[in-house]
Structures are given as C-alpha cells and as structure tokens.
Image (tube, grey):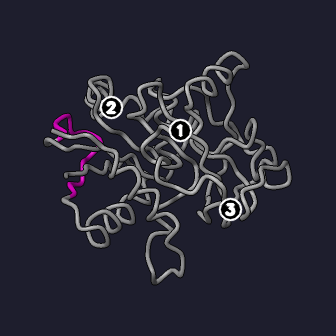
Amino acid sequence: MKFGVITFPGSNCDQDMIYVLETIMGYEVVNLWHKDTDLQGVDCVVLPGGFSYGDYLRSGAIAKMSPIMGSVIDFANNGGYVLGVCNGFQILTESGLLPGALRHNNSHKFICKNVFIKPVSKTAGITADLDHSRGYKIPIAHGEGNFYCSAETLAELKANDQVLFQYSTEAGEVTDAENPNGAIENIAGVCNANKNVFGMMPHPERAADAELSNQDGLELFKSMINHMVVA
C-alpha cells in the first residue's frame, strides 16, 4: 500500500504524518508537493495539518486552488481514498469533497490540548474497527475547528452514517462541556457519502507513537487501512 502526503506552503504536520505511516507502520510513502499534478500511483492521499498559505482568506481557501488539488478531486471522485487532518479537513471542505465548513472556534482563541473523541460511524473504514463505547485521546491544535453545516446537511450526514467522531468524555459521553470549539453536535470529523474521503480536526498522527505515551491515534490508521480496497 502506498500513501502520498501533500506539503502545502505552511504545512507543519506533513513530516509527522510521514513518520507515522512510513517508520511506525511500515508503508511506502511519497511526499507530494502542492505544485505537483502526478499523484504517483498512491492508494491514499493525505492532506496534513498546518497553516496552508498562512490561513489567509479562510483556512484552506487558497490551498484548494493548488495544482495538486485538481488531481486529488479527480482521484477522490474515482473512488480513491483521501484523509484530511485539521488544515487538511478545512481544505477538503473548501474543495467540496466534504460537506460543511470549519468556522472560528467559539472562544475566538487557538486551542491546543488533548481531547477525547467517540467513534460514531459504523460503516466508515476509519471508525469501523474502533470501540464505539469509549473516547479516544487525540490532540487538537486549531483556531478554526468549529464544524458547521445546515440542518438539511446534518440530517443527511446522520442518515448516511457520515459522522465519524464526536467530542466526548473518556467514557464516550457526548456533552456540551466536552465541545472545545462550538462544533455543531460536537462533530469532530465527517466523511463523504461514498466513505472514501475522511476529514477530522484532531491529530491522530500526534497520538501514534509509544514514545508519546499515547497510541490511540494508531488505532484510527489501522482501522482505515484494514478497510481500504485497493487494486
């Protein structure tokens, strides 16, 4: 299996993602540049966290116009797997590959801390193998992580089992007190209707190494990979 991790100007989690996929998990990884158009035959494209183009206009609004995104959109529309984390999630919503939008945190402050997220979707690959009764400890680091969508879109997300994660307690209880940014219904991640494009604000790559005393994020990667169907 081959992964491609994109670096945009301002990305700062690309090497963390490459380290986890390549060094810890042992997969082939290529580092794709935002001006590339050739995805080099990868099975999954990863859009990492950071501050692409300085988050000017809106987070992800300029990155969606990078040359590589045309190839990513075609790849996703043809069934290719795409994962966007934090700024990558923002880019995917701006590109129309995922529904909704990421707004400023309701505190209007940048938040960097560990949170717990409860898996919701039973049919999406990234959550299918997880324990849906508990929260997974995954760090967040964002200023615009407040997921929002219309009531109609929210109903569709629920009906299609597209909500990936909700902010919760360690025991998996979803409460207002555990919502760090004001996201509608505590939503921390969603996928597309075909369940091949995943987006989430928390950083699983920052919770995937025994040296960090937290490997909860590794379980997310394992689940996603276990359910990827590649030629």
- Image quadrant in which you'd find residue 44: top left
The span from disc 1 to disc 2 (Cα, nearest Å) is 13 Å
Bin the neighbour count of mark 3 within 10 Å (Cα to Cα): few under 14, some 14-19, many 20 and up: some
- Image quadrant in which you'd find residue 140: bottom right
Residue at image mark 2: 69
- The reply to whether callout 1 and callout 3 are in contact (CB within 8 Å) is no
Res. 149 mark: none
Inspect the image, locate mark 1, and give the three-letter code of the amino acid beneath it: Gln
Residue at image mark 3: 115
Nearer to me, 79 or 149: 79
Q: Which residues are magenta?
A: 29-39
Q: Secondary structure at mark 3?
A: strand
Question: Could you say where residue 112 lies in the image, as x and y percent from the top left?
Answer: 66, 63
Inspect the image, locate mark 2, and give the three-letter code of the amino acid beneath it: Met
Tell me which numbered mark, 1 or 3, is placed earlier along the sequence.
1
Q: Is residue 26 above or below residue 109?
A: below
